Amino acid sequence: VQLQASGGGLVQAGGSLRLSCAASGGTLSNYAVGWFRQAPGKEREFVARISRIVGSPFYADSVKGRFTISRDNVKNTVALQMNSLKPEDTAVYYCAGANMYRGSQYATAYDYWGQGTLVTVSS
């Protein structure tokens, strides 16, 4: 399966963006999907994940209550709705797919990666 992340851009602090992870060559509901981000000079960090089929979400503490991960099985996509954005959310955001039920907070658990989309939050 090939993944493509999109929806990044420039937004002011307090604003919102909606990222999308689109799949081709496979059915995304058959995979756990995670969102990760990497800020300049920092390691890639876990943001959120959603389980196969049922779509149970799990979030990093830093985004809990502000971000929402969801599936659209008709469109074969996974979205990350980001509200109340902060400058520290600035990063390249990646979606990833894993051949497991729940997914993981660890990037090494994922088998497929999208190319990343840049989110910049200005203060």
Image: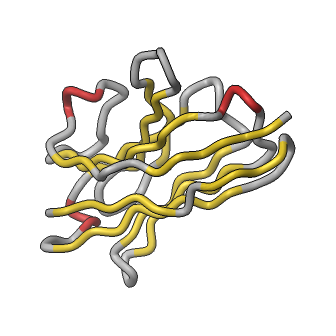
Is the C terminus in the top left, top right, bottom left or bottom right quadrant? Answer: top right
Q: Position of residue 70 (x, y in %)?
A: 51, 60
Query: Which of 24 and 60 lies nearest the eye of the viewer?
Result: 24
Q: Can you say whether 95 is above or below 55 in the image?
A: above
Specify the color scheme.
Answer: secondary structure
- Which residue is at a point 29% across and 52% down the rendered structure image? 114
Query: Camera-side residue: 95 or 33?
Result: 95
Nearer the observer, 23 or 64: 23
In the image, farthest residue toward the bottom: 74
- In percent of width and height, residue 85 lies at 76, 41
Q: Is residue 100 above or below residue 44?
A: below
- Report the residue at 51% width, 23% height from top: 40
Q: Quadrant of residue 74?
A: bottom left
* Residue appearing at x 44%, y 24% in the figure: 45
The image position of residue 55, as x and y in percent, is: 41, 57
Q: Is residue 73 left or right of residue 117?
A: left
Residue at image position (63%, 34%) is 90
Position of 40 with respect to 87 (left or right) is left
